[in-house]
Image (tube, rainbow, N blue to C red):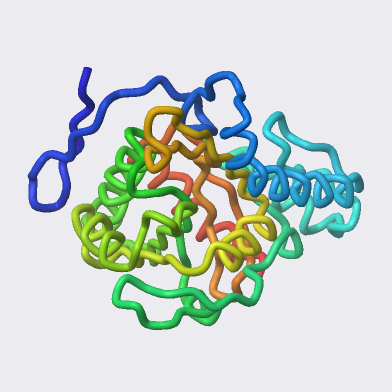
Amino acid sequence: MMVKILGTNNKPYSAPLIQSSQEFTMKKPKPTPKRRLLLALALAGIAAVGALVALQTRAPETSDGVVSSTTDPTVDDEEARALQTLQSNLKNSLVLPADFRQIPQFTLSDVDGEPLTEAMFDDRWSLMFFGFTSCPDVCPTTLSVVNGVVERLGEVGAEPPQVVFVTVDPARDSASRMKDYVAFFNEDFIGVTGEQNALHELTSELGIVVAFTANDDDPDAYTVDHTASLLLVDPERRVRAKLSAPHDVETIVSDYLELRAGLAELN
């Protein structure tokens, strides 16, 4: 089977359809020595995520490992009630307290090879998504949906977020490749690539899980499993919500507008 996604130029993006879950892009075959070598980096990232979760025992977790904001005892009663009310109005998102996570310092590159830092999130709302250009289904589908979200928000007169697509596969995703890929969906989307270590630090700090799987027939055709959620980042670089997969235009639009309105009242 083939899955076809239309970009802004109405040309189809086609890739083999591979079964996927809500949070990960592909199933992993049985491990081999080659695969274990490629998985070494991923294991370090998973260990870092485990450490973060251990530190977050102050509050219960949801089924996918995200700490629930509405029962965090460090959040004062008034804010907790406001977050609970806001959460009850959301369809497929999890609102997070202001001190949950913040975009860390980083130095990466845009699709023109120009440096990018955490300052790119200042003074604007952003939707952040992690993926890779060789992704057969989840990434193109998600970016197509997000483009629909931006268009729909424009139709209703709402301010759309800055959309940031960060590669988890910099070995293959050069700046030029990212430029062509991101522009297919929307030329205003910001593609981010850079050094593997810098990207690993960013994903670890934000709790993004990444795992590599080798291809025995072609070492360059390895696959990557990664978190499929979108992160909503506020103008102060704080991660304020997790928008869970599967993604749908109307659901994201509804949750985004609720989150913007509800969080504005808290600030």
Judge whether 49 appears above or below 23 on screen.
below
Point out residue 122 in the picture as x, y percentages from the top left corner: 52, 80
Q: Is residue 137 left or right of residue 265?
A: left
Q: Is residue 243 left or right of residue 68?
A: left
Residue at the image point whose x is 55% and y is 41% from the top: 227
Which is nearer the eye, 186 or 221? 221
Report the label total.
0
Residue at the image point whose x is 36% and y is 57% from the top: 173
Q: Is residue 91 left or right of residue 74?
A: left
Which is nearer the eye, 89 or 174? 174
Q: Is residue 132 left or right of residue 27?
A: left
Residue at the image point whose x is 63% and y is 43% from the top: 87
Residue at the image point whose x is 33% and y is 49% from the top: 133
Point out residue 45 in the picture as x, y percentages from the top left corner: 69, 49
Point out residue 5 in the picture as x, y percentages from the top left corner: 20, 37
Observer able to see residue 91: no
Point out residue 186 in the picture as x, y percentages from the top left corner: 23, 59
Q: Quadrant of the N terminus?
A: top left
Judge whether 163 appears above or below 227 on screen.
below
Which is nearer the eye, 116 or 63? 116
Observer able to see residue 73: yes
Instruction: Write down the quadrant of residue 215 in the picture.
Output: top left
Judge whether 17 appears above or below 262 on screen.
above
Q: Quadrant of the C terminus?
A: bottom right
